[in-house]
Image (spheres, helix red, strand yellow):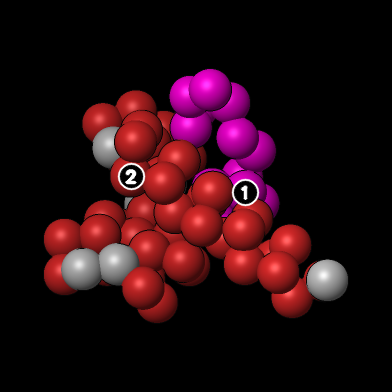
Amino acid sequence: MAAIHLDYDMLHKAAQQMEREGGSFARHIALAFFVADAMNQEALVKAFDELFLQFYRKYRREQRLTQE
């Protein structure tokens, strides 16, 4: 799966997770995502595909744990 296939809400959740729990680099990528226009958001997601996927998966795991 590639992060580019996630919809905007999923990418936003991944970026929120990055901002909360990522290191300095991940937090800055998240902040850039929040202020970017759609074209630049797409460029960030393509450039940092694994990072967005990693934090989206982390977000989903946490959601499943809180629902149990």
Image location (x, y in percent) of residue 57: 54, 49
Among the two numbered marks 2 and 1 on one chain, the one whose residue lies closer to the N terminus: 1
18 in the magenta segment: no
Identify the residue shown where x is 40% and y is 77%: 20
**Amino acid type assigned to the residue bearing label 2 in the image:** Leu
State the residue in front, 13 or 36: 13
Q: CA distance from mark 2 to mark 1?
A: 13 Å
Residue 53 in the image: above or below residue 68:
above
Q: Overall secondary structure of the magenta stretch?
A: helix
**Amino acid type assigned to the residue bearing label 1 in the image:** Met
Q: Which mark is residue 51?
A: 2
Category of crowding for the residue at label 1, using alpha-carbon neighbours closer than 10 angstroms: few (below 14), some (14–19), many (at least 20):
some
Residue 37 in the image: above or below residue 3:
below
11 in the magenta segment: yes
Q: Quadrant of the C terminus?
A: bottom right
Q: Is residue 41 visible?
A: no
Q: Is residue 3 visible?
A: yes
Residue 13 in the image: above or below residue 21:
above
Give the labeled residue for mark 1. Answer: 10
Identify the residue shown where x is 74% and y is 62%: 64
Q: Which residues are magenta?
A: 1-13
